[in-house]
């Protein structure tokens, strides 16, 4: 792998909402927020080709001022991101507090690395991407910033916008809502065109405060903060992206359904999400050899609860409104030739069970997950979603050539996004050691070849 290249910082500034445009506001935490207090920030990189006939000088003189101005207008709409995570002096509990004058850190830098190599699907040393990721400074653990941004210029090649967002402030739906709104204002220059405004009323989840207290007690009992600290980067990890095409997913669906020859079996959920996750899960288990043959293996994925609550919460609700759905399978079953079938069944059944109530497992989910981690059994999680449509984040320079979730290095998750180049396809980000990545890539590609025969 190539050595990390130098990144030269050109400017560090603060950008906030226009002065006096947002009233001082405090947002209390809900049951959906508290779990993320101990988790690392979500770090994404958006790579863009330079606009036609543009270069470093044109970007700094013309495009960068637009980027800063549109960011200020966007933070007027998404003001909590300019605020801080604090302990409320009244309740003693965490809340997000915005005070007029609060702002976010924006770093402007220049890199001499190979833009096209970093913005590709092939394996890259994660260390090469670190200089593009802004850091969230935590000088006071009781007064923590929630968002940091970095714009890195690759002269004559492209631009990378790096984001670090505290998961305690926003889930994937909320953070992509912010990014797309910022991009839209930058592209059009008109804040009034943003019709989808964030919704901040936390009272809609106040009836769940009892569950919030239970979850806080569980986090303390199971020392979740210590478990989160144990999430260390792997030795020399590499990151790569793999694409499941729409035709591959359709063929996989046919094969999985054909395995179920018994018409009396209950139908299973075989969405593109289920099939892609099942296929990747099986490839990852197989890439570990026989490590999981006689064990249970586990898969957890986020579920957006907004539309699943009773009454439902607005789709534009800003904050966290997700919980995890957990499923388990036998390692032996996933290591068989037809392992995608039982993997799909496990994930599909877990999704179908949500119809009985998305909160039914909330009381037991955290203790169950902690017991799995303690047992040493394989536990795979997911970051992102194809539904976020991250490749539609257009600042006026066209859609990104690549979007990466770098923070999966810390969490061990896989990341999901829609395919950039084909409607209906799904892109999967994976971080592994170099040797395991080689095994995984071989299994992934060989499996797709067999599907296409």
Image (tube, rainbow, N blue to C red):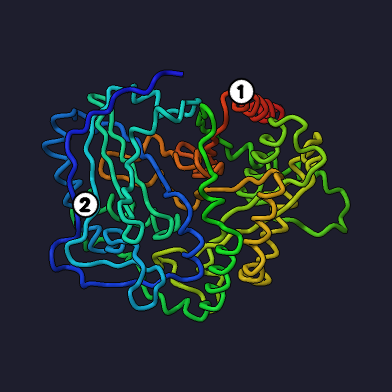
**Is 108 positioned to the left or the right of 253 in the image?**
left
185 or 57: nearer the viewer: 57
Q: Image point 46% across, 36% down: which residue?
A: 421
Q: Position of residue 66 (x, y in %)?
A: 16, 46
**Is 151 positioned to the left or the right of 236 in the image?**
left
Q: Image point 66% across, 46% down: which residue?
A: 379
Marker count (numbered):
2
Task: Determine whether label 2 and label 1 are within 8 Å by CB.
Answer: no
Q: Secondary structure at mark 2?
A: helix
Callout 2: few (<14), some (14-19), or many (20+) C-alpha neighbours within 10 Å? few
Q: Image point 12% across, 39% down: which residue?
A: 62
Q: Position of residue 177 (x, y in %)?
A: 37, 57
Q: Which mark is residue 169?
A: none
Residue situated furthest left in the rendering: 61
- Answer with the quarter of the image where residue 293 lies: top right
**Is 448 positioned to the left or the right of 219 in the image?**
right
Task: Locate the C terminus by quadrant.
Answer: top right
Q: Nearer the viewer, mark 2 or mark 1?
A: 1
Q: CA distance from mark 2 to mark 1?
A: 46 Å
53 or 334: nearer the viewer: 334
Identify the residue position indicated by label 1 in the image: 435
Callout 1: few (<14), some (14-19), or many (20+) C-alpha neighbours within 10 Å? few
Q: Relative to 131, is 274 above or below?
A: below
Q: Secondary structure at mark 1?
A: helix
Identify the residue position indicated by label 2 in the image: 188
Q: Position of residue 320 (x, y in %)?
A: 45, 63
First of labels 2, 1 by sequence position: 2
Q: Image point 41% across, 59% down: which residue?
A: 170
């Amino acid at each position: 792998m190539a050595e990390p290249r130098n990144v030269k910082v050109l400017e560090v500034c603060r950008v906030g909402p226009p002065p006096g445009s947002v009233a001082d506001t405090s947002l209390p935490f809900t049951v959906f927020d508290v779990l993320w207090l101990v988790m690392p920030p979500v770090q994404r990189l958006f790579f863009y080709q330079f606009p036609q006939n543009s270069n470093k000088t044109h970007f700094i003189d013309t495009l960068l001022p637009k980027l800063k101005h549109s960011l200020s207008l966007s933070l007027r709409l998404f003001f909590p991101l300019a605020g801080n995570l604090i302990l409320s002096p009244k309740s003693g509990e965490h809340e997000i507090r915005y005070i007029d004058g609060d702002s976010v850190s924006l770093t402007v830098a220049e890199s001499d690395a190979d833009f096209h190599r970093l913005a590709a699907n092939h394996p890259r040393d994660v260390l090469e991407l670190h200089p593009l990721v802004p850091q969230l400074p935590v000088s006071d653990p009781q007064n923590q910033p929630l968002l940091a941004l970095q714009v890195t210029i690759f002269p004559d090649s492209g631009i990378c916008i790096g984001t670090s967002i505290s998961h305690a402030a926003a889930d994937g739906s909320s953070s992509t809502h912010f990014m797309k709104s910022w991009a839209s204002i930058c592209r059009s220059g008109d804040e009034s065109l943003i019709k989808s405004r964030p919704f901040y009323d936390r009272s809609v989840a106040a009836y769940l405060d009892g569950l919030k207290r239970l979850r806080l007690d569980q986090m303390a009992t199971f020392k979740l903060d210590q478990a989160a600290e144990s999430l260390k980067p792997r030795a020399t990890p590499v990151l790569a992206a793999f694409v499941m095409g729409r035709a591959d997913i359709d063929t996989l669906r046919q094969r999985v359904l054909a395995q179920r020859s018994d018409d009396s079996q209950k139908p299973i959920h075989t969405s593109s999400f289920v099939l892609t996750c099942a296929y990747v899960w099986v490839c990852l288990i197989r890439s570990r050899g026989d490590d999981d043959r006689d064990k249970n293996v586990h898969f957890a994925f986020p579920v957006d609860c907004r539309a699943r609550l009773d009454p439902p919460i607005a789709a534009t609700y800003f904050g966290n409104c997700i919980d995890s759905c957990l499923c388990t399978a036998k390692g032996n079953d996933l290591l068989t030739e037809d392992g995608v079938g039982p993997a799909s069944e496990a994930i599909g059944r877990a999704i179908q069970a949500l119809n009985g109530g998305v909160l039914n497992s909330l009381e037991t989910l955290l203790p169950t997950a902690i017991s799995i981690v303690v047992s040493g059994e394989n536990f795979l999680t997911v970051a992102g979603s194809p539904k976020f449509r991250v490749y539609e984040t257009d600042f006026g320079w066209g859609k990104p050539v690549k979007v990466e979730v770098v923070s999966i290095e810390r969490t061990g998750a896989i990341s999901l996004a829609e395919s950039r180049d084909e409607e209906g396809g799904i892109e999967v980000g994976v971080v592994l050691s170099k040797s395991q990545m080689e095994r995984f890539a071989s299994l992934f590609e060989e499996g797709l070849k067999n599907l296409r025969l």
